[in-house]
Image: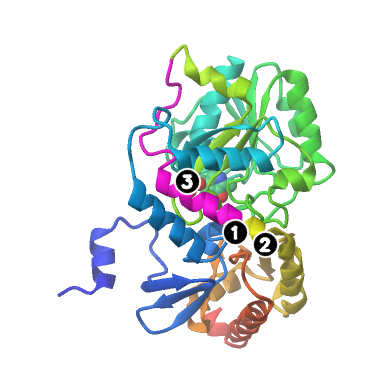
């Protein structure tokens, strides 16, 4: 009989030649529990999803209650489903007033697709501006605005009339013109290795978009729900987009995405043609119930407020000869090492030290720290102790580098 490990390799499509290959039987709080009897401290929230930790009792209860009432009823947008309605109203209550109309979808990539279509349809233009080293997902539209030639090139032809510019590069503002439908940007670039905007870059883009009639899309799929020490990066920078994209932590551990805009912009999807975006499972009631429960926990337990103190603790403890920088705010941190080869060693061997770590797609000399926001100060100290032992191991054993 084949083991689960063998079945995994035999029957599941693989996306890399070196999957993590841990077999987990249970996850609770900040820990994953393996079939090997070991427990692993989750330092990535798989990825930036489990902001309230794994199996939070209030999220589990909401899921169970909703499953007991109903699951899928009908394609999106036809039947009034209280989990969708309640969650959309709650989101509108914590977002700027012009972001009050929510289209729930299944994933981050689908939110990107919906937003790009919405911007093209609303402006009647086709040009889309995106940024170098941006990541917006893996579907064709999202891939067309991914800031990496390596990933884009293999799948051409992609969406036409897309244009890549530099993040934090003032020259990029000139590319936003009267033919531009939208600018899509992560307010803090995640996969680039946690890169913050500088010199009021977002403000300048906002101004330029407004003056040219282009829509500004913020992809907060990774930064949303407290990750940067603010509920949204919108609050951190005081810049309001025309369309906001959410996913990952939006579903509290269940698959859910959303593109959110004003009633005026969103209403363009109603006619010519009608059903401007269609999704069967988007806004699944169980996912909305879980997401709303998770958001309530984030607010009730003041998780956003606690983030910066926790971040400071990581930065205070993570001092080591191999670490050249700990970058970021809140609980989205990039730990930069002096050599990318050490990064590979550290991530690959983290489970031996009871830790789960991960790469950034476009930043080979750093690894990610993005634990559930509920992580305690003792757990942070424990994580840092283990990490430093792992870094010692990497440093002292050149063969392992
Ligand atoms: N946008 C950003 C900033 C992301 O980090 C991701 C996923 O990592 C996506 C979009 C795509 O989301 P999904 O994987 O749910 O399609």
Q: Position of residue 314 (x, y in %)?
A: 71, 73
In terms of image quadrants, where is residue 201?
A: top right
Protein image colouring: rainbow
Dot placed on the residue nearer the N-terminal end, 3 or 1: 3
CA gap between label 3 and label 1 equals: 14 Å
Check if mark 3's residue and mark 1's residue have beta carbons within 8 Å: no
Out of 103 and 341, give the one closest to the viewer.
103
Tell me, for residue 156, which label it has, or none: none
In terms of image quadrants, where is residue 165?
A: top right
Which residue is at 37% across, 39% downward? 281
Foreground mark, 1 or 2, reads: 1
- Magenta extent: 274-296
In the picture shown, does residue 397 fall above or below 207?
below
Q: Position of residue 73 (x, y in %)?
A: 33, 37
**Going by the image, does 186 lie left or right of 294?**
right
Out of 187 and 78, give the one closest to the viewer.
78
Q: Is mark 3 within 8 Å of ligand 1?
A: no
**Which residue is disc 2 drawn over?**
303
Check if mark 1's residue and mark 2's residue have beta carbons within 8 Å: yes
On the rendered image, what quadrant is the C terminus found in? bottom right
**Residue 294: within the magenta?**
yes
**Which residue is disc 3 drawn over?**
288
Which residue is at 34% across, 58% downward? 14
**Going by the image, does 68 lie left or right of 266?**
left
**Residue 6: within the magenta?**
no
**Which residue is disc 1 drawn over?**
297
CA gap between label 1 and label 2 equals: 8 Å
Which residue is at 46% across, 40% downward? 82
Q: Position of residue 207 (x, y in %)?
A: 80, 28
């Amino acid at each position: 009989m084949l083991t689960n490990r063998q079945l995994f390799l035999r029957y599941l499509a693989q996306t890399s030649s070196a999957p993590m290959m841990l077999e987990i039987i249970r996850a609770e709080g900040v820990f994953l529990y393996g079939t090997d009897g070991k427990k692993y401290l989750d330092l990535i929230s798989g990825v930036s999803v489990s902001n309230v930790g794994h199996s939070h009792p209030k999220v589990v209860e909401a899921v169970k209650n909703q499953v007991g009432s109903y699951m899928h009823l009908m394609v999106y947008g036809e039947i009034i489903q209280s989990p969708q309605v309640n969650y959309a109203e709650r989101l509108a209550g914590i977002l700027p007033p012009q972001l009050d109309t929510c289209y729930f979808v299944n994933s981050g990539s689908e939110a990107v697709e919906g937003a790009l279509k919405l911007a093209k349809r609303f402006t009647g233009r086709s040009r889309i501006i995106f940024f170098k080293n941006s990541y917006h997902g893996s579907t064709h539209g999202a891939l067309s605005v991914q800031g990496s030639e390596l990933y884009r090139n293999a799948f051409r032809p992609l969406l036409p009339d897309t244009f890549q510019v530099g993040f934090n590069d003032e020259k990029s503002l000139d590319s936003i013109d009267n033919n531009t439908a939208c600018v899509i940007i992560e307010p803090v670039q995640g996969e680039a290795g946690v890169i913050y905007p500088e010199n009021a870059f977002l403000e300048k883009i906002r101004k330029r978009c407004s003056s040219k009639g282009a829509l500004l899309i913020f992809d907060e799929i990774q930064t949303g729900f407290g990750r940067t020490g603010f509920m949204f990066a919108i609050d951190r920078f005081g810049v309001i987009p025309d369309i906001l994209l959410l996913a990952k932590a939006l579903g509290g551990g269940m698959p859910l995405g959303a593109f959110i805009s004003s009633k005026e912009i969103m209403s363009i999807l109603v006619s010519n043609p009608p059903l401007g975006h269609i999704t069967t499972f988007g806004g699944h009631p169980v996912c909305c119930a879980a997401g709303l429960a998770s958001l309530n926990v984030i607010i009730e337990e003041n998780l956003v407020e606690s983030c910066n103190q926790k971040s400071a603790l990581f930065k205070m403890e993570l001092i080591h000869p191999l670490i050249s920088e700990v970058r970021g705010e809140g609980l989205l941190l990039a730990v930069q090492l002096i050599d990318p080869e050490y990064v590979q060693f550290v991530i690959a061997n983290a489970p031996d030290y009871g830790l789960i770590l991960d790469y950034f797609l476009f930043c080979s000399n750093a690894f990610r720290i993005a634990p559930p926001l509920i992580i305690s100060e003792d757990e942070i100290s424990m994580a840092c102790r283990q990490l430093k032992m792992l870094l010692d191991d990497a440093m002292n054993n050149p063969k392992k580098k």
